[in-house]
Image (cartoon, helix red, strand yellow):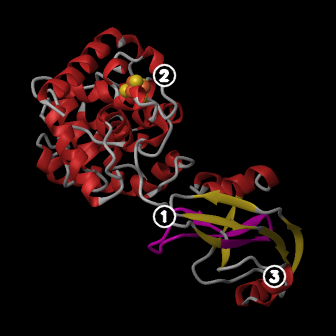
Amino acid sequence: MNIKDKSFFTKQLLLWNVEANGRKMPWKGEKNPYRIWLSEIILQQTRVEQGWDYYQRFIRKYPTIKKLASADETEVFKLWEGLGYYRRCKFLIESAKYIAKNLNGNFPDQYESIIKLKGVGPYTAAAIASFAFNLPYAVVDGNVYRILSRYFGISIPIDSDDGIKYFAGFSAELLDKSWPGIYNQSIMDFGATVCKPVPLCLDCPLQKKCFAFKSNTIELYPVKKKKPVRKIRWFYYIIAEYDHHILIKKREQKDIWQNLHEMILHESKEELSIDQLNQSGVFKKITRHASIIDISESYQQHLTHQTIKGRFIHVKLSIRPRLNGYKLENRSAILKLAFPKYITGYFEDSRILF
Ligand code: SF4
């Protein structure tokens, strides 16, 4: 493709942005790097409508980076509950503490220092650097892959090393170096409102020169490698209740849901019957002095690379239980803790806490 094609694309995008100003994402135009950082971290893997509510709650509770850095971590995780991908929350806290302690609460103003913050990748660093400091770094995310691959007919798989390198270099070429923040905002908004997964081609100002539109191949872009098979893990939780308290512990291990809370877990590689569960060590130990109150239906939650499936077994204990790492918590304490969606879904359905 020639320089003319590229500059036509950039120009049209900026023009579209001026005309579509009213359709901007709610927090765009923001210059405060803390707010941009927070919104971008919240928005990763999250729908805009859902993310916006969380963002507002966070800004109300932690209006500055120092407030976030000194916050009670359990409360921050509780506020994050339901957003998923909890490592983002952990990194948010760690980076806020780092900035408060080492940079006197001032957000770094260079791309190289921004990208060193935990949980900040090239996309988020480019967004913060360009929006807050007008630095010439191009954002590259799912929206950008989709628009560029369709418009220019690029067939390199976006999830291959070659693809990642190619799209990063190509995006940098297209970036308007005088207005990097506005260009980045335009391409992100354009991907969210026009060149969506199901695109609005008839309203698109790029239609005349769009390769995928002209060749009627929109559904072929962006190109991806073959999907890996999703792993299935079976999580059986025992809700061990004693005197209106439930045994709870924090997940400390390096695994999904780190820092969230859970009940007694028996994990299996395959589905288990109740008889098989009865034979498991932890189940045997805990149910020796217990009566089973309820066995839930099957639950499942899809994560990026795995699916969690299983059931919840609610038992009432006749003697006070002792189990390493677990604490007996009452209802009001449990309501303050953060749990994975898999467990909060069960809490809501069973109304066990109400
Ligand atoms: Fe995307 Fe359709 Fe516009 Fe092409 S014509 S850039 S596919 S919205």
Amino acid at dot 3: Ile
- Residue under numbered circle 2: 200
Q: Are marks 3 and 1 in contact (CB under 8 Å)?
A: no
Location of the N terminus (image quadrant): top left
CA–CA distance between discs 2 and 3? 63 Å
From this viewpoint, which residue is outermost toward the front?
A: 215
Badge 3 or badge 1: first in the primary sequence: 1
- Residues 115 and 282: in front is 115
Residue 253 covered by magenta stretch: yes
Q: Relative to 195, is 275 above or below?
A: below
> In the image, which is nearer the foreground, mark 1 or mark 2?
2
Three-letter code, disc 2: Leu
Q: Position of residue 251 (x, y in %)?
A: 53, 70
The residue stretch that appears in magenta: 234-262
As helix, strand or loop, the secondary structure at mark 2 comes to: loop
Q: How crowded is the residue under tag 3: few (<14 C-alpha within 10 Å), some, or many (20+)? A: few
Residue identified by numbered label 1 = 259
Residue 52 numbered mark, or none? none
